[in-house]
Amino acid sequence: MHQAGMSNADILKSATVNGVDLIDMSDKLGTLEVGKYADIIATDTSLLKQIEALLDVDFVMKGGKVYKNK
C-alpha cells in the first residue's frame, strides 16, 4: 500500500476504521473509545512517520493482557 503511494495515515485507517465500516461494526470496533473492544500494539516509532515500525512491535495488548515481543 505504501509503495503504491498511500500515506501512512491512510494505511492505518484502511486497517482499522475503514475496515470496520465495511462490516458495519463501527459502533463496537475500529477506534480507541470508551465502550469499544480494542487490541493495541506499541512501537518505539510513530507509525505515521514510519509504517515499517509495524515489523518491530514492542508489545501487544489483547483482552487486557500484555504480550511482550522483546
Image (cartoon, rainbow, N blue to C red):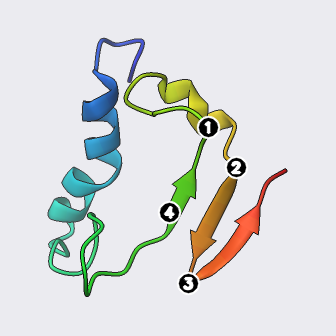
Side of 12 relative to 54 (left or right): left
What amino acid is labelled 1 in the image? Asp
Residue count near mark 1 (Cα–Cα under 10 Å), binned few <14, some 14–19, many ≥20? few
Q: Are the residues tagged 1 and 3 within 8 Å (C-beta)?
A: no
Mark sitting on residue 63: 3
Q: Quadrant of the N terminus?
A: top left
Residue appearing at x 26%, y 64% in the figure: 31
Residue 44's place in the image compared with 27, above or below, is above
Eyeballing the image, is 17 above or below 8? Answer: below
Mark 4: which amino acid? Ile
Residues at discs 2 and 1 in contact (Cβ within 8 Å) = yes
> From mark 1 to mark 4, how far is it between C-alphas?
14 Å
Question: For residue 40, which numbered disc appears in the image?
Answer: 4
Taking the image as shown, residue 24 lies to the left or right of residue 9, namely left
As shown in the figure, which amino acid type bears the numbered disc 3? Gly
Disc number for residue 58: 2
Q: CA distance from mark 2 to mark 4?
A: 11 Å
* Residue located at (73% from left, 68% from top): 67
Q: Residue at x 33, y 34 (%)?
A: 11
Q: Nearer the viewer, residue 28 or 19?
A: 28
- Relative image position of residue 54 (x, y in whole percent): 58, 38
Query: Foreground mark, 1 or 3?
Result: 1
